[in-house]
Each structure stands twice: as structure tokens, then as C-alpha cells.
Amino acid sequence: MELLQYANKKTLLILAAITIVLITWPFASVPTGSRGVVTQFGKIIGIEGEGLAVLPPWQKLQNFSIRAEQADMENAEGFTSDTQPVKVSMTVRYSISPEKVAEVYEKYTHTGDLSNYVQTATMEALKAVTARYVATDLIAKRNEVSTAIRDAVAAKLLNYGAQVINIDMKNFSFSPSYMAAVNEKVTQEQLRQAAENKLKTVEAEQKQKVAVAEAEAKATVATAQAQAESIRLQAAALRETSGLLDLKRVEVQMEQAKRWDGKLPQNIYASAPIPFLDVGKK
């Protein structure tokens, strides 16, 4: 009986010792992608990195996530500088800066979830950025607008100890009436440009025709001038040739005169020339 009582006491002592060890166990662990917030009587006294942490019993450790988180926004509404309502859907991926864990834990969240604050900051940034642009520029300058929104969101999240990883801009949407007006304007602009292009084509064709006509006229004048010059040269050549023939004829007659024996021909036919009587004629 005494042995049984002794065994029961021993078992109770062992259980009590195990309970005390579990309660006062000084070891804790911080998983990957987290930081351990160490508090003492409710006050933050330190931040533990990933891995094993040794704490006295009067201190507590709470794991705080610094992994990438995301905040989704569907049809967030803003207004352009020309007072057109615009809706934007986007996803903001962010993470809490490790050096800001104590501040964020104390002011905003004990878990690392800042999605509500991120959505609020993003809405403010969206309204501020869209107010700088007219509606058509939001479409034409989408990359520029996306960058401006990202920069504005990043600046605001710094106030909450978070940093932007990336922002996925899904779409900009406007009211159906405005989109119909934009489409009509685009159609009219296309028609105007088509008319201008057609006019330019007609003007170019007319200029080409005028140029061809001028070239043909110049060619005709040049041809006429060339023909006139040719005729002038031919006439001059003929005059020179006629003078040469007359001179040759005189030389032949002079030679014949030298050789004439002074006798006239005995038989003179009708219309036959009398030798040397035409000497000196022109």
C-alpha cells in the first residue's frame, strides 16, 4: 500500500514538473517570411528574426508576417479633369518592410495584414492621379497613368510601413454614353482624315498633270526652236553653196576663154548658148 502511494506521488511530481517546464519553456521559433514580435507585459521590447528564439517566461513572442500580400480592388471610382467618372480594377501586391515591423504592429495590425489600409491608400492615389488627366488621355497614356498611380500608392504605403511590389492595372472603364461619344468622335476623325488624304491625292494628281503639260509645252517650244534653227542653218548652207557654184562656173568659163581660138561655132542651134557671152552675169 505504501509502495502504491509512493508511486502515485512520484507520477504526480513528474506530471507537475512537465507542466512547469511546458509553461516556462524558454524556446520559441520564427518561421520563414516572418518576424517575431517580443513583448513584455504588453510592451514591445524586441524583434526576432527567422529561426530559434530563446525567451524568459515573462516574455511573449508573436509571429508577424512580412510575406507578400495583396489587396484587390474592383471598379474603384475616380474622376478625370474633365469630370468624367472612371472605374478602375487593380491588384496591389505589397509587403511590410522588416525594419517597420514594430511600428506596424503597434499602430496598425498584429498579423501583417494591411489590406484595408492599402485599399484606402490606393483609392486616394487613384482619385488624385485620374484628376490630372482628361478622359481620352487615360486611354492613350495608359502606361504613364499606371506608373503615376503606382508611385502615388507607393508613397502612401510608406506611411503604413509597407512597400509596393507591383500593381496590376486590369482596366479603365467609362460610362456607356461617354464611350459612344468617343467612338463617334473617332469615326468622324477617321472620315476627316480620309477626306484630307483624298484631297491631297487630287491636288497631287493635278500638280502632276500641270507639270506634264508644262514639260510638253517646253518640249514643243524646244522642238520648234530646233526646227527653226535647222531651217536657218540649211538656208545659210544653201546660200554658201550657191555662191560656190557661181564662182566655180566663172572659173570654168575663164579657163575656156583662155583656150578659145577666137572662132565662133559654125552651127548654132536654137536656144544654144553662145560661148562667153554670159561671162560676168549674176
Image (tube, grey):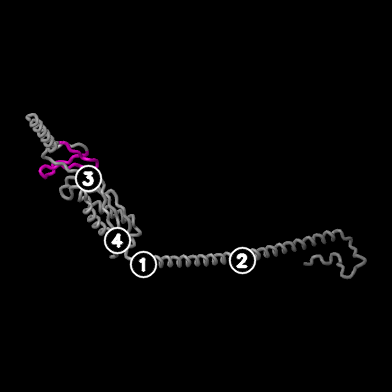
Residue 246 image point, x, y percent: 77, 63
Q: Are marks 1 and 4 in contact (CB under 8 Å)?
A: no
Would residue 64 be seen by someone viewing this image from the given angle? yes
- Assess whether mark 3 and mark 2 are in contact (beta carbons under 8 angstroms): no
Q: Amino acid at mark 4?
A: Lys
Query: Residue at the location (25% across, 59% down)?
Result: 127
Q: Which residue is mark 2?
A: 220
Q: Earlier in the sequence, mark 3 or mark 1?
A: 3
Q: Which residue is mark 1?
A: 180
For label 4, the SS is: strand
Upstream in sequence: badge 2 or badge 1: 1
Residue type, numbered disc 2: Thr
Q: Nearer the viewer, mark 2 or mark 1?
A: 1
Q: CA distance from mark 2 to mark 1?
A: 60 Å
Q: Which of the two discs, 1 and 4, labels the residue nearer the N terminus?
A: 4
Q: Which residues are magenta?
A: 26-50
Q: Amino acid at mark 1?
A: Ala
Label the magenta part by its dominant secondary structure: strand
- Disc 3: which residue: 65
Farthest top residue in view: 3
SS of the residue at dot 3?
Answer: strand
The Cα–Cα distance between marks 3 and 1, rounded to whole angstroms, is 47 Å
Q: Is residue 37 rendered magenta in the image? A: yes
Kindly report the distance in space between the C-alpha atoms of the residues bearing marks 4 and 2. 71 Å
| For the residues bearing labels 4 and 2, Cβ distance under 8 angstroms | no
Which residue bears the numbered disc 4? 87
Q: Is residue 6 magenta?
A: no
Secondary element type, mark 1: helix
Q: Quadrant of residue 244?
A: bottom right
